[in-house]
Image (spheres, grey):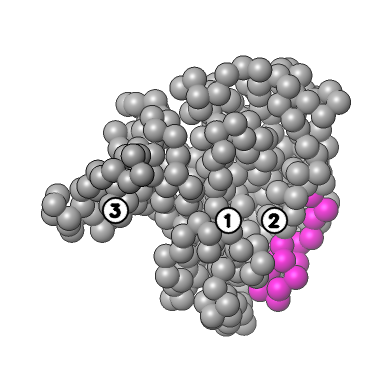
Amino acid sequence: MSDNSLGRSLLMVSFGESHGEAVGVLIEGIPAGTEIDEKRINEWLARRKPSTSAASTKRKEDDSVEILSGVYRGKATGAPFVAIVRNKGYVDDFYSFAEEGWVRPGHADYPAYIKYKGFNDPRGGGRFSARITVGFVIAGAVAEEILKPLRIEVVGYTKSIGSVECPDLDIESARKRYEFETRCPSTEHDALMQEEILKAKREGDSLGGTIRITTGKLPVGLGQPVFSSLDSELAKAYFSIPAVKGVEIGAGFRASKLRGSQNNDIYVLSNNEITTLTNNAGGILGGMTNGQPLIVTIAFKPVSSIYKPQRTVNVKKMEEGILQLKGMHDACVIPRAVPIAEALTYFVFADMALRGGFINER
């Protein structure tokens, strides 16, 4: 049995496959009367589209949302919200190898073949393709609207690609990320990252990297300890993005090398408000927000679809061979993953806010 849902008070059910008719999302729990702006959803989807850069995939999709239910005159009705985006820009011919039984190194082809007894759709990765994140982005656009009473702003940016790493940025500096090809709001590092991606692409290879998520100050107490702590719910959401291999909150692994006296965030009063001198906790203590900005770093592995010939196995014939992929692949997914990570952050916040009584039904 598969589990394609996320959330509780706000529940997202993801559906669709890379080369199927459509990908989309069903959302339960949207407070009746919430504004659902189709134009705003399409703006979110546009952020996820391939860029015009030579480093981006040649698969081009219109990615225009179709809302099937749950909205009347621009407002959520309280009924299940269902929205889809139709798949148009794929080429099945590139995946004849999958029908023959060849599995791609780095992909989920082999475990999916075994788990689903060969009945899974292997084209473009099927259910395991990053194409399914279209639904995540739609859900994030809706969650952003739900959170407006709390004035929560989520900003993500490209922290690193390959060996190129941008210094830490505050939310004000990071807001310009969509003005840059790599979503790294630094002219110097954006140029270096583009060069790094193009070099890997020329060599038929790919790159990974990291995304930093940050916010302004958050309301205190958002999160439902212990098994629905905010950090565990965020980590679950981020790990649902294909290619994510690591999540750090605040100082993360660096905290393991510090002493308590170095890692503890000291409380002080500033303008009669409680704040901290540092933010090693990344805005979360005991599974709840502590009022400070969220700081999360998400690590992505290199894209598994590369053009170099690789050894592999045919699971139908049980023989080894060499596989060289054709198709339309990104050399690096990080720039397109920034809005996906932002969207899932908004969604988890909205679910936690509804569960914790921070937002009331309208």
Picture quadrant of residue 149: top right
According to the image, label 3 marks what residue? Answer: 278
Image point (62%, 35%), residue name: 148
Q: Give, as a three-letter code, the residue at label 3.
A: Thr
Q: Marks 1 and 3, Cα distance to the nearest angstrom?
A: 25 Å
Q: Is residue 54 magenta?
A: yes
Pinpoint residue 73: horizontal percent, then vertical percent. Answer: 86, 26
Q: Is residue 323 visible?
A: no
Location of residue 55 (image quadrant) = bottom right
In front of the other: label 3 or label 2? 3
Task: Provide the secondary structure element on which disc 1 rests.
Answer: helix
- 199 within the magenta span: no
Q: Tell me if 86 is positioned left or right of 272 in this view.
A: right
Q: Is the residue 185 above or below the residue 234 in the image?
A: below
Kindly give the residue lying farthest to the front in the view shown: 271
In the image, residue 349 above or below residue 317: above
Give the crowd class for mark 2: few <14, some 14-19, many >=20 residues within 10 Å: some
Question: In the rendered structure, which disc, 1 or 2, sits on the residue that comes first in sequence?
Answer: 2
* Residue 290: mark in rendering: none
Reply above or below: 256 against 162.
above
| Residue 105 place in picture, x, y as percent | 51, 60
In contact (CB < 8 Å): disc 1 and disc 3: no
Question: Considering depth in this image, is 128 or 110 the residue closer to the camera?
Answer: 128
Q: What amino acid is labelled 1 in the image?
A: Val
Check the image and report above or below for 178 versus 361.
below
Report the front residue among 164 and 284.
Answer: 284
Q: Earlier in the sequence, mark 3 or mark 2?
A: 2
Q: Which residues are magenta?
A: 50-63
* Residue of label 2: 47
- Give me the disc on residue 338: 1
Tell whether label 2 touches label 1 (CB within 8 Å). yes
